[in-house]
Image (spheres, rainbow, N blue to C red):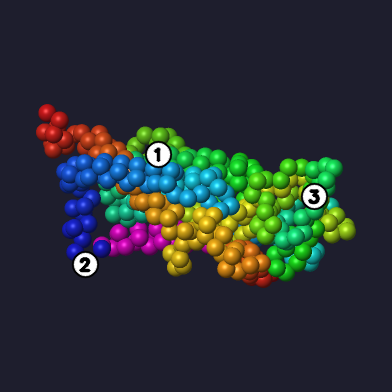
Protein backbone atom coordinates (compact mmCIF):
# COMPACT_ATOMS: atom_id res chain seq x y z
CA UNK A 1 0.00 0.00 0.00
CA UNK A 2 1.53 3.33 -0.96
CA UNK A 3 1.94 6.29 1.36
CA UNK A 4 -1.07 8.27 0.09
CA UNK A 5 -3.44 5.36 0.52
CA UNK A 6 -2.04 4.59 3.96
CA UNK A 7 -2.67 8.20 4.94
CA UNK A 8 -6.24 8.02 3.65
CA UNK A 9 -6.77 4.73 5.50
CA UNK A 10 -5.63 6.41 8.72
CA UNK A 11 -7.98 9.33 8.05
CA UNK A 12 -10.92 6.95 7.55
CA UNK A 13 -10.09 5.11 10.78
CA UNK A 14 -9.77 8.41 12.64
CA UNK A 15 -13.14 9.52 11.28
CA UNK A 16 -14.77 6.28 12.46
CA UNK A 17 -13.10 6.49 15.88
CA UNK A 18 -14.07 10.15 16.30
CA UNK A 19 -17.71 9.60 15.38
CA UNK A 20 -17.80 6.46 17.52
CA UNK A 21 -16.49 8.23 20.60
CA UNK A 22 -18.80 11.23 20.09
CA UNK A 23 -21.89 9.05 19.75
CA UNK A 24 -20.85 6.81 22.65
CA UNK A 25 -20.47 9.84 24.94
CA UNK A 26 -23.82 11.22 23.79
CA UNK A 27 -25.59 7.92 24.42
CA UNK A 28 -23.87 7.58 27.78
CA UNK A 29 -25.08 11.04 28.80
CA UNK A 30 -28.62 10.25 27.64
CA UNK A 31 -28.70 6.67 28.92
CA UNK A 32 -31.56 7.26 31.37
CA UNK A 33 -33.68 9.02 28.74
CA UNK A 34 -33.21 6.29 26.15
CA UNK A 35 -34.64 3.66 28.48
CA UNK A 36 -38.18 3.06 27.35
CA UNK A 37 -39.51 2.35 30.84
CA UNK A 38 -38.62 2.35 34.53
CA UNK A 39 -38.35 -0.98 36.31
CA UNK A 40 -40.17 -1.62 39.60
CA UNK A 41 -36.85 -1.51 41.46
CA UNK A 42 -36.14 1.95 40.06
CA UNK A 43 -39.61 3.10 41.11
CA UNK A 44 -39.11 1.69 44.60
CA UNK A 45 -35.71 3.38 44.84
CA UNK A 46 -37.26 6.74 43.96
CA UNK A 47 -35.43 7.04 40.64
CA UNK A 48 -38.69 7.35 38.71
CA UNK A 49 -40.55 10.69 38.72
CA UNK A 50 -43.66 10.73 40.94
CA UNK A 51 -46.80 12.34 39.55
CA UNK A 52 -45.49 12.63 36.01
CA UNK A 53 -46.44 10.60 32.98
CA UNK A 54 -43.87 7.89 32.39
CA UNK A 55 -43.63 4.22 31.55
CA UNK A 56 -43.09 1.33 33.92
CA UNK A 57 -42.31 -2.18 32.86
CA UNK A 58 -41.79 -5.59 34.36
CA UNK A 59 -43.15 -9.10 34.55
CA UNK A 60 -46.71 -9.66 35.76
CA UNK A 61 -46.52 -11.50 39.09
CA UNK A 62 -48.42 -14.80 38.69
CA UNK A 63 -51.60 -14.80 40.75
CA UNK A 64 -51.61 -11.05 41.27
CA UNK A 65 -54.14 -10.16 38.57
CA UNK A 66 -57.49 -9.03 40.00
CA UNK A 67 -60.26 -8.16 37.58
CA UNK A 68 -63.29 -6.14 38.61
CA UNK A 69 -66.44 -8.07 37.73
CA UNK A 70 -68.51 -4.90 37.08
CA UNK A 71 -66.11 -2.94 34.88
CA UNK A 72 -62.90 -3.15 32.86
CA UNK A 73 -60.84 -2.24 35.93
CA UNK A 74 -57.93 -4.52 36.58
CA UNK A 75 -55.04 -4.45 38.99
CA UNK A 76 -51.87 -6.50 39.03
CA UNK A 77 -48.33 -6.35 40.35
CA UNK A 78 -45.22 -6.16 38.21
CA UNK A 79 -41.77 -7.28 39.27
CA UNK A 80 -38.21 -7.30 37.99
CA UNK A 81 -36.93 -9.67 40.64
CA UNK A 82 -35.73 -6.77 42.79
CA UNK A 83 -38.92 -4.83 43.46
CA UNK A 84 -42.68 -4.93 42.99
CA UNK A 85 -45.18 -2.25 42.03
CA UNK A 86 -48.97 -2.47 41.94
CA UNK A 87 -50.56 -1.27 38.70
CA UNK A 88 -54.18 -0.10 38.34
CA UNK A 89 -55.64 0.02 34.86
CA UNK A 90 -59.03 0.43 33.25
CA UNK A 91 -59.36 -0.74 29.69
CA UNK A 92 -58.78 -3.62 27.34
CA UNK A 93 -55.58 -5.54 27.89
CA UNK A 94 -53.61 -6.82 24.87
CA UNK A 95 -54.09 -10.47 23.89
CA UNK A 96 -50.60 -11.33 25.00
CA UNK A 97 -51.15 -10.08 28.53
CA UNK A 98 -50.30 -13.24 30.48
CA UNK A 99 -49.25 -13.77 34.07
CA UNK A 100 -45.51 -14.21 34.21
CA UNK A 101 -45.02 -12.34 30.95
CA UNK A 102 -43.70 -8.82 30.40
CA UNK A 103 -45.75 -5.62 30.19
CA UNK A 104 -44.94 -1.96 29.63
CA UNK A 105 -47.49 0.46 31.10
CA UNK A 106 -47.86 4.19 30.46
CA UNK A 107 -49.20 6.20 33.37
CA UNK A 108 -48.28 7.99 36.58
CA UNK A 109 -46.76 6.76 39.79
CA UNK A 110 -48.69 8.07 42.80
CA UNK A 111 -47.35 9.08 46.21
CA UNK A 112 -48.79 5.82 47.56
CA UNK A 113 -46.51 3.85 45.22
CA UNK A 114 -49.39 2.67 43.05
CA UNK A 115 -48.94 3.02 39.31
CA UNK A 116 -52.09 4.29 37.57
CA UNK A 117 -51.82 3.16 33.96
CA UNK A 118 -53.66 4.63 30.99
CA UNK A 119 -52.18 2.20 28.48
CA UNK A 120 -50.78 -1.32 28.87
CA UNK A 121 -48.66 -2.96 26.18
CA UNK A 122 -47.54 -6.58 26.22
CA UNK A 123 -43.84 -7.30 25.87
CA UNK A 124 -43.10 -10.75 24.56
CA UNK A 125 -39.68 -12.34 24.73
CA UNK A 126 -37.38 -13.77 22.08
CA UNK A 127 -38.39 -17.41 22.61
CA UNK A 128 -40.54 -19.19 20.09
CA UNK A 129 -41.81 -22.74 20.41
CA UNK A 130 -44.79 -24.86 19.43
CA UNK A 131 -47.58 -25.24 22.03
CA UNK A 132 -46.72 -28.92 22.57
CA UNK A 133 -43.21 -28.03 23.68
CA UNK A 134 -44.53 -25.51 26.19
CA UNK A 135 -47.02 -28.12 27.44
CA UNK A 136 -44.23 -30.66 27.86
CA UNK A 137 -42.19 -28.15 29.86
CA UNK A 138 -45.22 -27.40 32.06
CA UNK A 139 -45.80 -31.09 32.72
CA UNK A 140 -42.15 -31.82 33.46
CA UNK A 141 -41.90 -28.89 35.87
CA UNK A 142 -45.31 -28.30 37.44
CA UNK A 143 -45.70 -24.89 39.01
CA UNK A 144 -42.70 -23.66 37.11
CA UNK A 145 -43.45 -20.90 34.65
CA UNK A 146 -41.61 -20.52 31.37
CA UNK A 147 -37.84 -20.82 31.87
CA UNK A 148 -37.54 -17.60 29.94
CA UNK A 149 -39.45 -15.56 32.50
CA UNK A 150 -36.73 -16.10 35.01
CA UNK A 151 -33.94 -15.45 32.56
CA UNK A 152 -35.66 -12.23 31.51
CA UNK A 153 -36.06 -11.15 35.12
CA UNK A 154 -32.46 -11.98 35.83
CA UNK A 155 -31.14 -10.20 32.78
CA UNK A 156 -33.26 -7.14 33.59
CA UNK A 157 -31.94 -7.22 37.12
CA UNK A 158 -28.40 -7.47 35.82
CA UNK A 159 -28.85 -4.59 33.43
CA UNK A 160 -30.29 -2.59 36.31
CA UNK A 161 -27.33 -3.32 38.54
CA UNK A 162 -24.94 -2.47 35.73
CA UNK A 163 -26.72 0.78 35.10
CA UNK A 164 -26.70 2.02 38.69
CA UNK B 1 1.60 -7.76 -0.27
CA UNK B 2 0.46 -8.09 -3.86
CA UNK B 3 -2.49 -5.83 -4.59
CA UNK B 4 -2.97 -6.66 -8.28
CA UNK B 5 -5.80 -9.08 -7.50
CA UNK B 6 -7.57 -6.32 -5.57
CA UNK B 7 -7.30 -3.92 -8.49
CA UNK B 8 -8.44 -6.54 -10.98
CA UNK B 9 -11.52 -7.11 -8.83
CA UNK B 10 -12.20 -3.42 -9.04
CA UNK B 11 -12.16 -3.35 -12.83
CA UNK B 12 -15.69 -2.66 -14.12
CA UNK B 13 -15.16 -4.70 -17.28
CA UNK B 14 -13.88 -7.72 -15.37
CA UNK B 15 -16.82 -7.54 -12.98
CA UNK B 16 -19.31 -7.11 -15.82
CA UNK B 17 -17.98 -10.20 -17.58
CA UNK B 18 -17.85 -12.47 -14.56
CA UNK B 19 -21.16 -11.37 -13.00
CA UNK B 20 -23.04 -12.32 -16.16
CA UNK B 21 -22.29 -15.94 -15.35
CA UNK B 22 -23.68 -15.62 -11.81
CA UNK B 23 -27.08 -14.28 -12.83
CA UNK B 24 -28.94 -17.51 -13.73
CA UNK B 25 -27.70 -19.21 -10.54
CA UNK B 26 -28.73 -16.28 -8.38
CA UNK B 27 -32.15 -16.10 -10.01
CA UNK B 28 -32.96 -19.78 -9.55
CA UNK B 29 -31.46 -20.16 -6.06
CA UNK B 30 -33.01 -17.04 -4.55
CA UNK B 31 -36.44 -17.80 -6.00
CA UNK B 32 -36.39 -21.44 -4.84
CA UNK B 33 -35.05 -20.64 -1.37
CA UNK B 34 -37.52 -17.82 -0.69
CA UNK B 35 -40.46 -19.86 -1.99
CA UNK B 36 -39.54 -22.95 0.04
CA UNK B 37 -38.82 -20.93 3.17
CA UNK B 38 -42.03 -18.89 3.01
CA UNK B 39 -44.33 -21.80 2.17
CA UNK B 40 -42.68 -23.86 4.93
CA UNK B 41 -42.73 -21.03 7.44
CA UNK B 42 -46.18 -19.65 6.69
CA UNK B 43 -48.07 -22.90 6.14
CA UNK B 44 -46.26 -25.84 7.69
CA UNK B 45 -44.45 -24.78 10.88
CA UNK B 46 -46.43 -25.08 14.11
CA UNK B 47 -47.90 -21.91 15.66
CA UNK B 48 -46.15 -20.28 18.61
CA UNK B 49 -47.30 -21.26 22.12
CA UNK B 50 -47.92 -17.62 23.06
CA UNK B 51 -48.43 -15.61 19.89
CA UNK B 52 -50.26 -18.23 17.83
CA UNK B 53 -50.06 -17.51 14.13
CA UNK B 54 -49.11 -13.86 14.36
CA UNK B 55 -45.44 -14.74 14.94
CA UNK B 56 -45.23 -16.05 11.36
CA UNK B 57 -44.38 -12.58 10.07
CA UNK B 58 -40.95 -13.29 11.57
CA UNK B 59 -40.11 -15.15 8.34
CA UNK B 60 -40.21 -11.81 6.51
CA UNK B 61 -39.44 -9.36 9.31
CA UNK B 62 -36.18 -10.91 10.48
CA UNK B 63 -34.60 -11.46 7.01
CA UNK B 64 -35.61 -7.91 6.00
CA UNK B 65 -34.07 -6.47 9.18
CA UNK B 66 -30.88 -8.51 8.68
CA UNK B 67 -30.56 -7.20 5.14
CA UNK B 68 -31.34 -3.61 6.07
CA UNK B 69 -28.36 -3.65 8.42
CA UNK B 70 -26.02 -5.86 6.32
CA UNK B 71 -26.51 -3.72 3.23
CA UNK B 72 -25.53 -0.66 5.24
CA UNK B 73 -22.35 -2.36 6.47
CA UNK B 74 -21.52 -3.31 2.87
CA UNK B 75 -22.12 0.30 1.82
CA UNK B 76 -19.79 1.55 4.55
CA UNK B 77 -17.15 -0.93 3.38
CA UNK B 78 -17.57 0.25 -0.20
CA UNK B 79 -17.31 3.82 1.09
CA UNK B 80 -13.98 3.09 2.79
CA UNK B 81 -12.67 1.46 -0.40
CA UNK B 82 -13.84 4.49 -2.42
CA UNK B 83 -12.10 6.92 -0.09
CA UNK B 84 -8.84 5.01 0.28
CA UNK B 85 -8.28 3.28 -3.07
CA UNK B 86 -10.48 5.49 -5.31
CA UNK B 87 -11.87 2.40 -7.00
CA UNK B 88 -14.78 3.44 -9.21
CA UNK B 89 -16.58 0.11 -8.92
CA UNK B 90 -16.84 0.57 -5.14
CA UNK B 91 -18.62 3.89 -5.61
CA UNK B 92 -20.95 2.36 -8.19
CA UNK B 93 -21.76 -0.40 -5.69
CA UNK B 94 -22.37 2.20 -2.99
CA UNK B 95 -24.78 4.03 -5.27
CA UNK B 96 -26.80 1.00 -6.40
CA UNK B 97 -27.02 -0.56 -2.93
CA UNK B 98 -28.62 2.44 -1.21
CA UNK B 99 -32.17 2.08 -2.64
CA UNK B 100 -32.11 -1.70 -2.05
CA UNK B 101 -31.09 -1.22 1.57
CA UNK B 102 -33.74 1.46 2.02
CA UNK B 103 -36.39 -0.94 0.64
CA UNK B 104 -35.42 -3.67 3.10
CA UNK B 105 -35.46 -1.08 5.88
CA UNK B 106 -39.00 0.01 4.97
CA UNK B 107 -40.07 -3.64 4.74
CA UNK B 108 -38.59 -4.26 8.19
CA UNK B 109 -40.35 -1.24 9.73
CA UNK B 110 -43.72 -2.05 8.10
CA UNK B 111 -43.69 -5.76 8.99
CA UNK B 112 -42.57 -4.81 12.50
CA UNK B 113 -45.55 -2.48 12.88
CA UNK B 114 -47.94 -5.16 11.55
CA UNK B 115 -46.45 -7.61 14.06
CA UNK B 116 -46.55 -5.11 16.91
CA UNK B 117 -50.26 -4.39 16.61
CA UNK B 118 -51.57 -7.87 17.55
CA UNK B 119 -48.78 -8.75 20.00
CA UNK B 120 -47.69 -5.59 21.83
CA UNK B 121 -50.98 -3.78 21.27
CA UNK B 122 -49.48 -0.88 19.32
CA UNK B 123 -48.11 -0.16 15.86
CA UNK B 124 -45.21 1.94 17.02
CA UNK B 125 -43.35 2.97 20.17
CA UNK B 126 -40.35 5.24 20.47
CA UNK B 127 -38.09 2.67 22.08
CA UNK B 128 -34.38 2.46 21.30
CA UNK B 129 -34.58 -0.39 18.76
CA UNK B 130 -37.42 1.06 16.69
CA UNK B 131 -36.04 4.59 16.76
CA UNK B 132 -32.54 3.46 15.72
CA UNK B 133 -34.07 1.50 12.84
CA UNK B 134 -35.98 4.62 11.72
CA UNK B 135 -32.70 6.58 11.84
CA UNK B 136 -31.20 3.91 9.56
CA UNK B 137 -33.96 4.58 7.04
CA UNK B 138 -33.26 8.32 7.24
CA UNK B 139 -29.55 7.60 6.64
CA UNK B 140 -30.41 5.62 3.52
CA UNK B 141 -32.68 8.40 2.27
CA UNK B 142 -30.00 10.98 3.09
CA UNK B 143 -27.36 9.10 1.09
CA UNK B 144 -29.70 8.75 -1.89
CA UNK B 145 -30.64 12.44 -1.72
CA UNK B 146 -27.02 13.56 -1.35
CA UNK B 147 -26.10 11.61 -4.48
CA UNK B 148 -28.92 13.27 -6.38
CA UNK B 149 -27.97 16.74 -5.18
CA UNK B 150 -24.34 16.67 -6.41
CA UNK B 151 -23.81 16.55 -10.15
CA UNK B 152 -20.10 15.76 -10.45
CA UNK B 153 -19.53 12.03 -10.03
CA UNK B 154 -16.27 12.40 -8.06
CA UNK B 155 -17.67 14.94 -5.61
CA UNK B 156 -20.82 12.86 -5.11
CA UNK B 157 -18.69 9.77 -4.49
CA UNK B 158 -16.66 11.49 -1.80
CA UNK B 159 -19.65 13.09 -0.04
CA UNK B 160 -21.73 9.89 -0.06
CA UNK B 161 -18.76 7.84 1.17
CA UNK B 162 -18.20 10.10 4.14
CA UNK B 163 -21.91 10.12 5.04
CA UNK B 164 -22.06 6.30 4.74
CA UNK B 165 -19.02 5.92 7.00
CA UNK B 166 -20.35 8.31 9.62
CA UNK B 167 -23.71 6.53 9.67
CA UNK B 168 -22.24 3.08 10.26
CA UNK B 169 -22.00 3.93 13.96
CA UNK B 170 -25.78 3.40 14.04
CA UNK B 171 -25.46 -0.32 13.20
CA UNK B 172 -24.03 -1.49 16.57
CA UNK B 173 -26.60 0.77 18.26
CA UNK B 174 -29.41 -1.08 16.47
CA UNK B 175 -27.84 -4.44 17.25
CA UNK B 176 -27.23 -3.85 20.96
CA UNK B 177 -30.13 -1.45 21.71
CA UNK B 178 -32.16 -4.29 23.20
CA UNK B 179 -29.27 -5.21 25.56
CA UNK B 180 -28.16 -1.72 26.57
CA UNK B 181 -31.55 -0.20 27.33
CA UNK B 182 -35.04 -1.16 28.42
CA UNK B 183 -36.99 -1.60 25.20
CA UNK B 184 -40.39 -2.93 24.24
CA UNK B 185 -38.72 -4.88 21.45
CA UNK B 186 -37.56 -8.31 22.57
CA UNK B 187 -33.94 -9.43 22.54
CA UNK B 188 -32.22 -11.28 19.72
CA UNK B 189 -33.44 -14.79 18.91
CA UNK B 190 -30.50 -15.69 16.69
CA UNK B 191 -27.24 -15.24 18.56
CA UNK B 192 -23.69 -15.84 17.45
CA UNK B 193 -22.43 -17.34 20.68
CA UNK B 194 -25.50 -19.06 22.10
CA UNK B 195 -28.09 -21.51 20.89
CA UNK B 196 -31.00 -19.77 19.14
CA UNK B 197 -34.05 -19.46 21.41
CA UNK B 198 -36.39 -20.92 18.85
CA UNK B 199 -37.66 -24.44 18.24
CA UNK B 200 -35.82 -26.23 15.42
CA UNK B 201 -38.91 -26.64 13.21
CA UNK B 202 -39.33 -22.84 13.21
CA UNK B 203 -35.63 -22.09 12.97
CA UNK B 204 -34.97 -23.96 9.71
CA UNK B 205 -37.43 -22.05 7.52
CA UNK B 206 -36.18 -18.82 9.13
CA UNK B 207 -32.55 -19.58 8.27
CA UNK B 208 -33.58 -20.57 4.73
CA UNK B 209 -35.51 -17.32 4.37
CA UNK B 210 -32.50 -15.30 5.53
CA UNK B 211 -30.24 -17.08 3.04
CA UNK B 212 -32.83 -16.59 0.29
CA UNK B 213 -33.11 -12.86 1.07
CA UNK B 214 -29.31 -12.50 0.93
CA UNK B 215 -29.22 -14.21 -2.49
CA UNK B 216 -32.13 -12.07 -3.69
CA UNK B 217 -30.27 -8.96 -2.55
CA UNK B 218 -27.12 -10.14 -4.39
CA UNK B 219 -29.18 -10.69 -7.52
CA UNK B 220 -30.82 -7.25 -7.46
CA UNK B 221 -27.52 -5.60 -6.56
CA UNK B 222 -25.62 -7.31 -9.42
CA UNK B 223 -28.36 -6.42 -11.92
CA UNK B 224 -28.32 -2.76 -10.85
CA UNK B 225 -24.52 -2.65 -10.74
CA UNK B 226 -24.27 -3.98 -14.32
CA UNK B 227 -26.56 -1.21 -15.53
CA UNK B 228 -24.54 1.36 -13.59
CA UNK B 229 -21.27 0.04 -15.08
CA UNK B 230 -22.62 0.29 -18.63
CA UNK B 231 -23.92 3.80 -18.06
CA UNK B 232 -20.74 5.13 -16.42
CA UNK B 233 -18.33 3.40 -18.80
CA UNK B 234 -20.36 4.19 -21.91
CA UNK B 235 -17.46 6.11 -23.46
CA UNK B 236 -14.95 3.24 -23.16
CA UNK B 237 -14.20 1.01 -26.08
CA UNK B 238 -15.37 -2.27 -24.49
CA UNK B 239 -18.85 -0.90 -23.78
CA UNK B 240 -19.13 0.52 -27.31
CA UNK B 241 -18.15 -2.89 -28.70
CA UNK B 242 -20.61 -4.57 -26.34
CA UNK B 243 -23.61 -2.54 -27.45
CA UNK B 244 -22.78 -2.36 -31.14
In the rendered view, would you say B234 is above or below A93? above
Q: Is residue B41 left or right of residue B178?
A: left
Q: Is residue A60 left or right of residue B137?
A: right
Residue B208, given in percent of the width and then of the height, sits at 36, 51
User: Which residue is label 1 attached to?
Assistant: B99
- The local crowd at label 3, few if under 14, some if 14 to 19, many if 20 or more residues have their Cα within 10 Å, is some
Residue A62 visible to the viewer: yes
Question: Who's the residue at 47% across and 40% down the image?
Answer: B107
Mark 3 against mark 2, which lies toward the viewer? 3
Question: Disc 2 designates what residue?
Answer: B1
Which residue shows up at 72% across the image and 51% down it? A105
View extreme (top): residue: B244
Quadrant hosting residue A27? bottom right
Check if residue A8 falls in the magenta segment.
yes
Q: Which residues are magenta?
A: A2-22
Q: Where does label 3 land, which residue?
A: A67
How far apart in space, not on screen, are marks 3 and 2 (Cα)?
73 Å
Q: Main secondary structure of the magenta part?
A: helix
Query: Contact, CB < 8 Å: mark 1 with mark 3?
Result: no
Amino acid sequence: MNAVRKQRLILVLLLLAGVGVAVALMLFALRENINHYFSPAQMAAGEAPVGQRMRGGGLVVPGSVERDTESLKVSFRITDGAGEVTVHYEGILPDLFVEGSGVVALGTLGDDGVFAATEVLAKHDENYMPPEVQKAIDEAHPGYTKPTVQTTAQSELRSLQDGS
Amino acid sequence: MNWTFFHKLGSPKWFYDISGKWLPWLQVLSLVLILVALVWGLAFTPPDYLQGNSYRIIFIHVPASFLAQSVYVMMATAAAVTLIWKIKLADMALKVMAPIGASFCILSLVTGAIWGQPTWGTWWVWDARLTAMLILLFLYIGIIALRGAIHTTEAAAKACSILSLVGVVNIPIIKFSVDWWNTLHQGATLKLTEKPSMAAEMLWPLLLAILGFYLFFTLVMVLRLRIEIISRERKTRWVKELVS
